[in-house]
Image (cartoon, coloured by chain):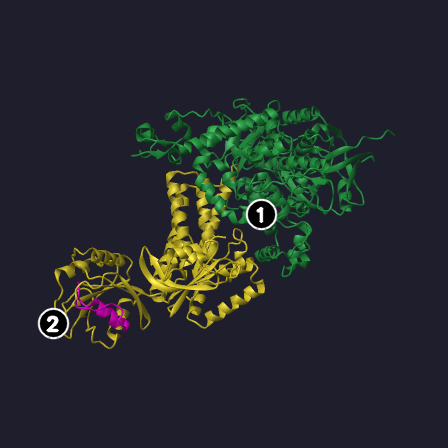
Amino acid sequence: MPEIIPFDVAVIGAGHAGVEAALASAKRGCKTALFTISLDQIGNMPCNPSIGGSAKGHLVREIDALGGVMGEAGDACCIQMRMLNLSKGVSVHSPRAQADRRAYHTYIKKICENTKNLQIIQTEIADVEIDENNRVQAVINRFGAKYPCKAVVICAGTFLNGMVYIGKTGVESGPDACLPARSLSANLIKHDIKLRRFKTGTPCRVHKRSIDYTVLQPQYGDPDPQPFSFMAERGSLRNEAVCYIANTTPETHQIIRDNIYESPLYSGIIHGVGPRYCPSIEDKVIRFPARERHQIFVEPTGLDTDEMYMQGFSTSLPEHVQIQMYRSIKGFEHIEIMRSAYAIEYDCINPICLYHTLGFRGFHGLYAAGQFNGTSGYEEAAAQGIIVGINASAYVKGEEELSLTRKSSYIGTLIDDLVTKGTEDPYRMMTARSEYRLSLRHSNADARLTPIGRKYGLISDARWSAFTAKMERIANAVETIKKTSVRPDTVNDYLERCGTSPITQKVRLDALIRRQQVHCEAILQVLGLDFGLRGEESAEVSHQIKYEQYIARQDQQNAHLEHLEHIRLPKDVDFTSVHGLSSEAVEKLGKQTPENLAQASRISGVSPADIAILMTWLKAGGYHGE
Amino acid sequence: MNTIAAISTPNAVGGIAMIRVSGDNAIEAASAVFQPVGNIKVTEMRGYTCAYGYITDHGERLDDVVLTVFRAPHSYTGEDTVEITCHGGLYLSKQILALLYRCGCVPAGPGEFTKRAFLNGKLSLSQAEAVMDVIRADGAASLRQANLAKQGKMHERMFTISNHLVEMLSAFAYWLDDAEDMPPELERDTLDNKLQSIQHQLQTMSDNYQNGRILREGIRTVLLGRPNAGKSSVMNWLCGMQRSIVTDIAGTTRDVITEQVKIDEYTLLLSDTAGLRETDNQIESIGISQAYQALDTADLVLYVVDAAVGITPEDQDTLSKCVGCPALVLWNKTDLTDAEPPALDIPVLSISALHADSVAPLSDTLRKIFSNACIPDQPTVMNERQNALILHAIERITESRALLTNGAELDMIYICLEDAAHALREIDGSDVSDDVIDGVFSKFCVGK
């Protein structure tokens, strides 16, 4: 038998996490293998045919800023683009695209195929070989073939011991009728990795012709859509698809209540925990009995298919109930279901067993990302994927691994939440999860993260010089505006036109721009100030000025947290030797080994008193190592 | 660390009071308000040394004090610390504290001095807890016990209000995030109504604090009257000591003199003022304008009239200006004349300040005037620090409401409301997320 050449990094699973991980690793020069159960499902969207959304759009732009692929692919396969939350303030503006699902798969597969150092292999990985020093050695497939490697990234999604339920019947299956992964779980448990069950669900796909669109409310893409990728040209997106909004009726809710005993969740067959922020329709009806209706968004799954996705209507009730439910909704009286809604239950870890690098505690070279880590959503998965790809390759190359701070990004916030607090249900990103919301705009993701992507070799020279030029233009504009004073006669006409009081003496330009009614770009034009700003840049200049004082207030509120962030905890502290810590704190701190006091303070079971004791102990020089 | 200051002696009238200042700029801040007697520079004083001198505010002497300097790390907190020992009136010590705030000090949180001592390794946690026990024991023995009991209720009330705000914030946050399955649109009007209600409740608490303050801290009393009506004699009668210079030259008292006197259950914080008259004398006219200023914050006006002269049109004019607070006419010098006091729509008390040997008639009248003043049944905040936090929250809510009306971005409004919520949670001690270790020390009194 010819010897197999060892890989540097082996990625198990080619969903949104696995793809980002494999691409990052390969681009960083590591010989990388991407294993998938089906080559036809690489970058698959087994649930909603969309990328982005509230807070998720931020994640996509952050992934793009770091040098990931999701933004570029989302733009390329976009069939409708909208900016959400436009009425609520720029920090929560979030782009969301309807994507052509098959086109997305094809696009991603093509990129993987064309990436140097990356080999895609269709097989089911059944085991990870780990030596007596807890060092990763190889992965082994169902048939016993061994692929030696230095690092392994588990991105198993919902495949591990996947069970699909419709009504009370469960069958062993992965998502979208793929084969499940039946062996890996047992072998991970053998390595002392604890697994638990989560569940998630997806709604029906129905035939386009079976809907009466005349009674539904259409929803179109934005007139001038903003792409995800910082490299994309505005105006390059396809945007022709139309979505529709329908509403459930009291009759729908009655049908659900009458048949709730048929639900595998409510009858107790599924024990897995479902996502709180993406509930099934039966969850919504039971949890919010006062609501008279819930919205359903009808979304095309692509341009060359008649399958329509019913967003907001996931369920695990049996098919005959599903049909009844649809028939009770205006516009769906003659619905033809092509794929029934189902719930899927799967094995995953509690992510507190990971470091901020997404490496497993207690192992060398073993990493994990995506739904396997207890998250929900393509974007959350991809966000972890790029970090884990950077870190597995950094491990192989002997470089310092990357852990993003909460202040830097939603990705940093996501990972910090996962590994310090853990999660009790599939974790969905929300802007409310960040205490730095005002400064984490989707539009400044590049300013925050592209230098980091550059440091890790994911940003090309051309992109880097475009980026630095952009940053210079913005900084120059902001700086000049702050140094400029304007005379009443030059702006009063404009000020009165936009309904704000005229000025009586010279006023600093930034003070005027801070006024609600004043539009930054317009006033610059009135004054004949041209900074050569392009695309999103003038909006960014405006945000930096208009939000300055509020961001200062936000940072002031977080100052204490940052102070704790800077008090580092050495890696090998014996917490039992710290006098006065509660026993729960000793146990949790010992297990999770936080890097600093801010992380320690977020661990449940570690009280403020424990933090105070640690602080004094550190200051008093209780620690003499390192 | 920033520099904190607080009155470390109990929140009651005493012989002396001590103000403690700790932090990087403690010595600098103290030197800005303290004018030493002799050729001493506060910034050059060594640790464990004292200086005698004056606290001055824009050149005006507030009090003569002793100032003690402790140099880091040899102090209670382990930081540079200054202790200012002044005369024990609440009004006076608070004025000195206010001066220090103006020089960059910030109010100390509950137990913050001890917390700093703890953080700087000067105390172990158990020692810190012992300090807390001692403070509690003091409290049990004093009047403050009643206040502490009320404080429990206040926290309940505070918790309810801040919960309203936090609930609103989380609904707000949810709504900011939720782009798809939308709850009914949050209307700006609805938000504003909710905020108005919260603002109103907070305002009531702050008002109640002000009402309770009359009994807890004293009645801010202004002595008014035309020159030589006998205001200073009245002052001395009330104080039972020669405080103001009594002469028969009109215009002797040119500045506002403060004094506190206990009359049964009431404490009067007395300001003797310059006699009110048209004058060309510059210094005297400053005194007169100060008298009118004192009127702005007064709880009571004692208007002294020379019975021999009677009520003049000038008096009528001044009395008509005392609309913001109760007034009492003191029909003085009855030993010199038999003139009967006129009928007025404000109470009149006949006295002879120079010869009176009892303040009983005054205390009866006070009881009539302040029959409504009481420690409010409604639980309320108990000290300046808490009241300042409430006022901070009110300010932020007001700002948010203005932003709402202006059509400002909702994420900006959110950050203002979050700030308000932080302030409220700091009062009820439930905010540990932002200021983690404060939780341990939240049971401390300010100044310890």
Name the subunit of mark 1. Answer: A
The residue drawn where x is 25% and y is 69% is B235
Residue sitting nearer the eye, B228 or A178: B228
Classified by dominant secondary structure, the portion drawn in magenta counts as loop
Above or below A553: residue B5? below
Would residue B420 appear left or right of A54 to someone viewing this image? left
Would residue A207 appear left or right of B345 to someone viewing this image? right
Q: Label for residue A566?
A: 1
Disc 2 marks which residue?
B339
| Magenta stretch encompasses residue B144 | no
Circle nearer the viewer, 2 or 1: 1
* Residue B336 lies in quadrant: bottom left
Q: Colour of chain B?
A: yellow
Question: Most extreme residue toward the front, as rendered?
Answer: B39
Q: Label for residue A315?
A: none
Residue B376 in percent (x, y) is at 37, 64
Span colored in magenta: B226-248
Residue A325 in percent (x, y) is at 58, 37
**SS for callout 2:** loop
Q: Chain A is drawn in which colour?
A: green
Q: Which amino acid does label 1 sit on?
A: His
Question: Most extreme residue toward the right, as rendered?
Answer: A1
Can I make out residue B376 in this image?
no
